[in-house]
Amino acid sequence: MDGILSILKPVGPTSHDMVRLVKRLTNAERAGHGGTLDPQASGVLPILLGHATRVSEYLLDVAKVYRATISMGATSSTYDREGEITPAGDAGRISLEAVREALPRFQGFILQRPPMFSAVKRHGQPLYKMARAGKEVERAERTVHVKRIDLLDWSPPLLTLDIECGRGTYIRSIAHELGQALGCGAYLASLERRRVGPFSIEEALTIEQLEEAAREGFLDRLLYPADLLLLHLPAAIVSDADVRAIGQGQYFHSVEFAPTSHTQCRAYDFAGEMVALLTKDKTGEMWKPSKVLLGSRIAETLGPGPDPEGVIDG
């Protein structure tokens, strides 16, 4: 089974729990998720199966949309509801206008310092392990991109935002720093991921729908093709001989109907099946397979690709 399932992860299970569930239901040998969701978060979690795992990194760079509920008037040691909560101010005195005026500073390309309770490593050790041991260390700021923040509701002490952002953005940190900016403290009360690139929450499968589809034998019809993540690249058609060359990892000079002005393209056989992602070499004259996605008829020519399980939080 090759392709992508868009799953609606509930609050509670880890992202790896969901991967294990999908592997059990599909009997897939290889599966991985496309961007970690914390156990206390819910929402869209793409699961890649089979040869689709070879393009998992293309999910890391797509935009993601989160719905964040922020509790104002208190702080948390973990910046979310899992930590030690400490009252910090009167949220009732914060006006809607004050909130609107504070939000723009968290949009665009901004510097963000990872929270201590995060999987970022320092000297090979995750920060959250140091935090649990009562240690706090310096964390370098890094640039993240927040494309937009939409204010949906302000009913003190709860603020609801939709946030569209790029990889590496900590919504918890935005909540914490917003509370600092408003002088009343804040922490992330709940988080729902509503979109990951082309995958929306409206179309995501619940665990119950996933199990029913597996039980009734139509789970394969719910798969998205792997090339859905590569539609920003031009397409080319390759001959049967080139398909065999791709299966053997060989370079070749030309592809039929290939775009001449691009250095990467999607390669399809005459049956319309995507077989590889091709990249031009340094000379610009030869094509080479950089990602091989051959179908079952010649899949035996492939070796195992990298396992995307444990992919960094996007």
Image (cartoon, grey):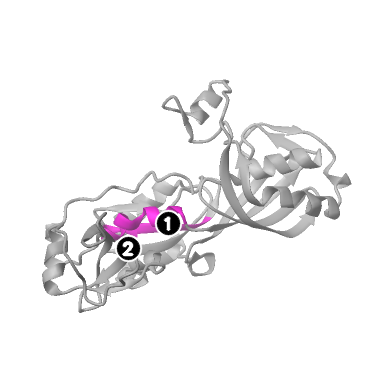
Q: Report the magenta residues as a range.
A: 43-61
The amino acid type of the residue labelled 1 equals Leu
Could you say where residue 254 lies in the image, as x and y percent from the top left?
A: 19, 69
- CA neighbours of label 1 inside 10 A, class few (<14), some (14 to 19), many (20+): many
- For this view, does 123 lie left or right of residue 180? left
- For this view, does 26 lie left or right of residue 83? left
Disc 1, SS:
helix
Can residue 33 be found in the magenta stretch? no
Which of the numbered marks, if any, corresponds to residue 59?
A: 1
Residue 79 visible somewhere in the drawing? yes
The amino acid type of the residue labelled 2 equals Gln
Could you say where residue 234 lies in the image, as x and y percent from the top left?
A: 35, 71
Q: Nearer the viewer, residue 292 or 78?
A: 292
Can residue 60 be found in the magenta stretch? yes
What's the residue at 82%, 36% (across, down)?
89
Residue that mark 2 sits on: 264
Q: Nearer the viewer, residue 27 or 59?
A: 59
- For this view, does 217 lie left or right of residue 211? left
